[in-house]
Image (spheres, helix red, strand yellow):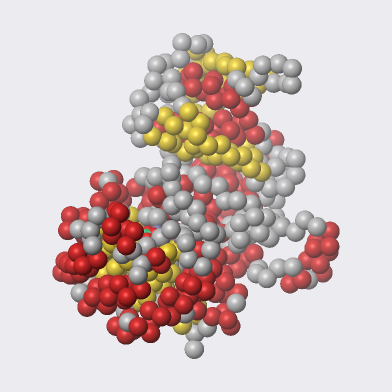
Amino acid sequence: MSKKIHIFDTTLRDGEQVPGAKLNKRQKIEIAQQLANLRVDVIEAGFPCSSPGDLDAVREISRQVEGPVIAALARAVKEDIDIAWQAVREAKRPRIHVFLGSSDIHIQKKLRSDRDKALEMAVGAVKYAKSLCDEIEFSTEDGSRTDFEFLCRIIDETIKAGACVINVPDTVGYALPEEFGSLIAKLRQSVPSLDRVLLSVHCHNDLGLAVANSMAAIRNGADQVECTINGIGERAGNASLEEIVMVLKTRSENYQAQTSIDTREIYRTSRMVSRIMNIPVQPNKAIVGSNAFSHSSGIHQDGVLKDRTTYEIMKPEELGIKQQTIVLTARSGRAALRHRLQELGFTLEAQIFERVYNRFIDVADRKKEINALDLQSIVEIEVSKVPETYKMHSIQIMSGNKMVPLASVTLERDGQLYTDAATGNGPVDAVFKGIERITGVPGKLRDYDLKAVTMGTDALGEAMVRVEMGDDIYSGIGSSPDVIEASARAYLNACNRYFANGGATGIQNPGDINC
Ligand code: KIV
Ligand code: ZN
């Protein structure tokens, strides 16, 4: 009989710990809603004691998002547990997730304590959390490096104290698959009370083994896996949700286990998380990378044309990757665009549809054919736009191998046009400096990524930036058939996020004003 593996998604908590990936409330709700469409079993929505903003976002997710259990993380202290409970108490199915370091390294070096005191602290915290909430998960942080006897003891005692999910993390990504699998099997044999609760694992990817370790754990008795979309997370990240789910689906006979995930939502969720968090997906990433289903060698192409199963073990459609048969052109009207968007699963409010249409016409004028991936990029960028303090009007670039690149930039603000020019190390640098001169906000570029959305020299370029402005890092995304314009749009998007977040507008440009 096939066993159900519970998928605990921690994109909004462990994933959000990636530097620069901090989300606002609206963005967290948007992702949580999509995780519910994906049918994850648990959404770990945040670590509410980390900031009032996170408390607010987790509370709103608890109110609005139905289906999955909504969990909030708390250290094993009363204040954290109280705040976590405030955040999830309005959820239909709330869970408080309490954690405490259980390895000697963590107990002695981090907590400056000893095993007995740590045990007492864990039991006290679980009992207290249980007095507030029915569903308590307890995590033995650094579980894979914890003394086995002590691990059994802390697990058994926290189950007696009321935990109904026990999570054993490989916090530092140190474990090997055989080792981690046998740890789970030994725990099952040595702690009979584990049969009354769900046994969970949480693997990090420092040695690139997070998914392999999670799979070994499933084979040896784990009921729940904790993972993130695109494998994002602390340092090298967490186990990737889409990889675990597709291993279980594609090789189900080897695991006798399945999940409730609607795999047709995987690609959309991956794109959404990458776009909102501004963390590009590497092209060769398993399952969701842009090359995951593209065949470049002649022999492979020949095989796939004869029969897809020669070189494909999964169907792109299973992941919700749409076929690119229909293309639109600048002559396609609103009705054709609306029809195609509906086919791709986008139903847009009238106002957003108009923005998408205008952008579509602008891009289609310059790029002959607009296919599904182009449209997806245009829609995703328009849907996620923050209020635009400054709008892109036009840019002009002069660049060459024997000249200093020069950019002239015109932005629109409150109906007025502002123009300024700047030189730079390259055309992108020049255009960013031009924008900076107009907005008056100095920015330090922390990250810049540019990729082609589709194949061919006329492909739509998609740029992602992360810019330090004031005390924070703001991300931005932009697309255009012209890569300099895509970069400028991304930079401007980051500036507008800064303004939407209350950032000061800066000194007005002393340059030309064309009314
Ligand atoms: O990696 C880890 O140990 C964690 C715990 C808080 C579950 O993220
Ligand atoms: Zn973690």
Point out residue 244 in the picture as x, y percentages from the top left corner: 52, 68
Residue at image coords 28%, 48%: 50
Examine the image and state in which quarter residue 185 appears. Answer: bottom left
Examine the image and state in which quarter residue 251 appears. Answer: bottom right
Which quadrant of the picture is home to ligand 2?
bottom left
Point out residue 395 in the picture as x, y percentages from the top left corner: 60, 23
Vertical comparison of 443 with 120: above or below: above
Residue at image coords 42%, 64%: 170
Vertical comparison of 255 with 132: above or below: below
Residue at image coords 60%, 20%: 424
Residue nearest the viewer, comparing 415 with 195: 195
Vertical comparison of 41 with 25: above or below: below
Q: Is there any visible trace of residue 219 in the rendered image? A: yes
Residue nearest the viewer, comparing 302 with 252: 252
236 with respect to 95 (left or right)? right
Point out residue 8 in the picture as x, y percentages from the top left corner: 40, 66
Q: Is there any visible trace of residue 493 in the rendered image? A: no
